Structure formats: C-alpha cells, structure tokens
Image: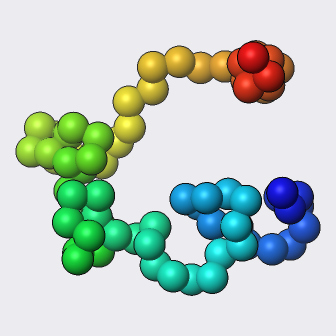
Amino acid sequence: MAKKDDGVKHCVIVEENICDNCGYCDLCEFDSTKVCDNCMKCIGLDGEVDYAGIIIDKVLTYDEYRKSKKQ
C-alpha cells in the first residue's frame, strides 16, 4: 500500500488504489445512474432535517483509534 503522504491522490472507496478520476465516489448509493445530491437517504436522514449532518456515536483519541485497528 502506498503511503498517504506520497503526494498521490488515493481512491476514497479503495484506499490502496490511486485515484483515476473514475467518478464512482460521486454516485448515489441507491441509484447508480445518478450523481449524489446530498439527499441523505444513505445515512437515514432523508426528509427529517433541513440541514446536512452526520451522527457521531463515538469519539476516540488517536492512540485509542490505533489500538482498535490493531485488534
């Protein structure tokens, strides 16, 4: 796997790959013929709120995160 600080843009879907601007990351999860329009259906917030956001269920320090990845 390439280093993250190697100056190369990596794919956000498969981090080991180098980004080739395929556009896959911009597609809607529910309709692969549509570009994402931030409808929020993919995270279960469609129609419930009038703003975009994410749900945070846990906050880890860097050390806690690294430990959880080693397990």
Q: What colour scheme governs how the chains and residues are painted in the rendered image of this protein? A: rainbow
Considering only vertical position in the picture, is 66 above or below 51? above
Q: Residue 10: name its quadrant.
A: bottom right
Q: Residue 36: name its quadrant.
A: bottom left
Q: Number of marks in the image?
A: 0
Considering only vertical position in the picture, is 29 above or below 46? below
- In percent of width and height, residue 23 lies at 46, 78
Of the 4 image quadrants, the one containing the N terminus is bottom right
- In percent of width and height, residue 48 lies at 11, 38
Considering only vertical position in the picture, is 45 above or below 58? below
Question: Residue at point 23% right, 75% down?
Answer: 34
Q: Residue 28: name its quadrant.
A: bottom left
Question: Residue at point 67% right, 57% down?
Answer: 15
Q: Residue furthest left?
A: 47
Tell me if 3 is positioned left or right of 30 in this view. Answer: right
Question: Residue at point 46% right, 67% down?
Answer: 25
Question: Residue at point 27% right, 47% down?
Answer: 42
- In percent of width and height, residue 46 lies at 14, 45
Q: Residue furthest bottom?
A: 21
Tell me if 46 is positioned left or right of 67 in this view. Answer: left
Q: Nearer the viewer, residue 17 or 35?
A: 17
Tell me, yes or no, if residue 61 can be seen here: no
- In percent of width and height, residue 18 lies at 72, 73
